[in-house]
Image (cartoon, rainbow, N blue to C red):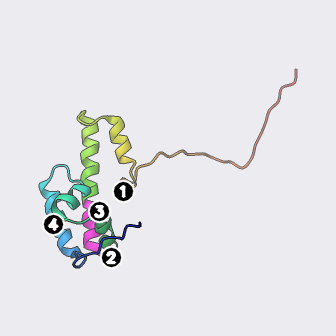
Amino acid sequence: MSKEEPKKIGREPTFNADDLAKQLLKYITESNDPIIQEFCLDFAGCSRDTLYRLAKENRLLSDTIKKCHAKQEIRTQRGVENGTINPTFGIFKLKQKCYGWSDKQELEHSGCASIKVDWE
């Protein structure tokens, strides 16, 4: 016996990117610790994937999401500096793609190799 997929009833919900941007900006302004996932779940009624998909097509929403990330980055940096956020967690968080931090190793290649051998 195979299970049939449940029939979808009604239309897929539609979201207006400009309205979401306004709601998100209000959420960022009113929250000390704005989190995209919380906004989507508690305020917008959409998934994070939907929000990011709409942001690809709407510059206002994309810029507003960047403002949220900027506020989170500042809050995390200040929290680490004043001791309210664990430094290891802060570094881990800031290395997420949206914040642009990463471990970098700088290697210098001069193109020549010289080896000095002392035979005594």
Q: Which residue is mark 1?
A: 98
Q: Position of residue 103 (x, y in %)?
A: 47, 45
Magenta part, dominant SS: helix
* 3D distance between C-alphas at marks 3 and 4: 14 Å
In the image, what residue occupies the spot 23% across and 35% down? 84
Determine the secondary structure under disc 1. Answer: helix
- Identify residue type, mark 2: Glu
Q: How many residues crowd mark 4 within 10 Å: few (<14), some (14–19), many (20+)?
A: some
- Among all residues in the image, which is located at the extreme right? 120
Give the mark nearer the N terminus: 2 vs 3: 3
Q: Which residue is mark 4?
A: 23
Between marks 2 and 3 in the image, the one whose residue lies nearer the viewer? 3
In the image, what residue occupies the spot 66% across and 48% down? 109
In the image, what residue occupies the spot 25% across and 70% down? 61
Magenta region: 57-67
Determine the secondary structure under disc 3. Answer: helix
Q: Which residue is mark 3?
A: 48
Contact check, label 2 and label 3, Cβ < 8 Å:
no
**Residue nearer the viewer, 83 or 33:** 33
Q: Position of residue 58 (x, y in %)?
A: 29, 75
* 3D distance between C-alphas at marks 1 and 2: 18 Å
Question: Which of the 4 image quadrants contains residue 62?
Answer: bottom left
Q: Which residue is mark 2?
A: 57
- Identify residue type, mark 3: Arg
* 3D distance between C-alphas at marks 4 and 1: 20 Å
Looking at the image, residue 42 sits to the left or right of residue 47; the answer is left
**Residue nearer the viewer, 117 or 105:** 105
Give the mark nearer the N terminus: 1 vs 3: 3
